[in-house]
Amino acid sequence: MKTTTPFQHLHWLAAMAVLVIAAQSILLPAPALAQPATTRTIELRTVQLTLPAEAVLEATRQATVATQVSGRIVEVLVEAGQRVKAGQLLMRIDAREASENAAAARAQLVQAEANFQRTQNLFKQKFVSQAALDKAEADLKSARAQAAAAGAGVSHAAVTAPLAGIVAERHAELGELAAPGRPLVTLFEPKGLRAIVSIPQFKLKDAQRATTARIEFPESRLVLPGARIEILPTVDAKSHTATARVYLPDSAEVLQGIVPGMAARVHFVVGTAQKLTVPPTAILRRGEISAVYVLGNGPARLRQVRLGEPVADGEIEVLSGLAAGETVSLDPVKTGIELKQMPGK
């Protein structure tokens, strides 16, 4: 009979303990992981009633810079998208032609003043008529206006930014001819943005009841709260629409990537109501037919529903086909596959 030493006996007990722990770890169930919800019990919910309207963004502070003189653009210092400070130099224009015009205008002014004095003296001596004196005075006023304009033109050879902001567009290139009144650069202040909405006359009273509004950007699914609503007190006689302005928040982080000219959709909040809604993920669309999988005691059943408009939080109103308390699948495609894999299917 083979005997064991105390050391061998302890080694055997340790090995048995390891086997028992390993067996228990195999038999014990793994901890449950948090799974996303796959069903929803449909209930009546309090949702906001909104008046949707298409809108276009514009800057509250925007300026188109032009020059008062004619001249060749000899220096361009900004590009579209560049941030500039108030008073920063944007372009430089060759003002030599303007200087020549200013000198000619001053010479004409001197001649007009001398002519007026001479005509006035002749009028006092009854040698010229009142009409001749009036003409001399008119010529003097015209010469003064031309001299003032020409003198101002020389000081505007350097085109500067009237406000701090971003260059939205540059309308002229190096070497082109700048003319009085021709746009050169458009600037806007990015923090001051608002959505411009045209409201039909028959919906104007509904919009005037709204105290809050949301601005939605459908392509990015971004929704921002309106900081302030402003409805102009007049209606356009041709389009029979009123203009509403919904101001965006001034947060630079929120407005990242939002610029004037973008399309948006404004939702004026006009009240609340109790509605039956479902998430868009629960809806299975086949052509013009909309359906959901309803879960009950037996297998899930596909049921056609009639849907309304999307409500404030993105869910869709159910007009008929569902009742409060029923449970629907939030993954109808997966539910349909599982039904096909069931025995007897």
Image: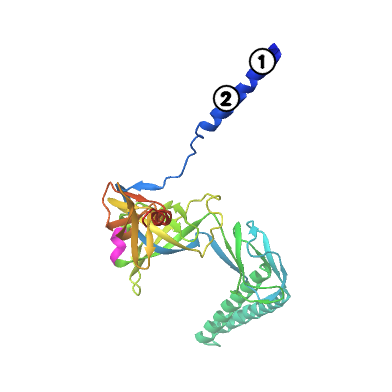
Q: Horizontal placement of 208 versus 177: left or right? A: left
Residue 336 visible, this orientation: yes
Q: Secondary structure at mark 1?
A: helix
Count numbered badges in the picture: 2
Q: Report the quarter where the N terminus lies.
A: top right
Q: Horizontal placement of 28 versus 157: left or right? A: left
Q: Which residue is mark 2?
A: 20
C-beta proximity under 8 Å, tags 2 and 1: no
Furthest residue to the top?
Answer: 6
**Dot 1 alpha-carbon crowd within 10 angstroms: few under 14, some 14 to 19, many 20 or more:** few
Residue 272 visible, this orientation: no
Q: Position of residue 46 (x, y in %)?
A: 30, 47
Q: Horizontal placement of 185 versus 294: left or right? A: right
Q: Which residue is mark 1?
A: 10
Q: Position of residue 124 (x, y in %)?
A: 55, 81
Specify the principal SS of the magenta part: helix
Q: Which residues are magenta?
A: 202-206
The residue drawn where x is 47% and y is 56% is: 221
Q: Position of residue 250 (x, y in %)?
A: 51, 51
The colour scheme used to paint the residues is rainbow
**Relative to the observer, which residue lies in front, 100 or 225?**
225
**Relative to the observer, which residue lies in front, 81 or 234?**
81
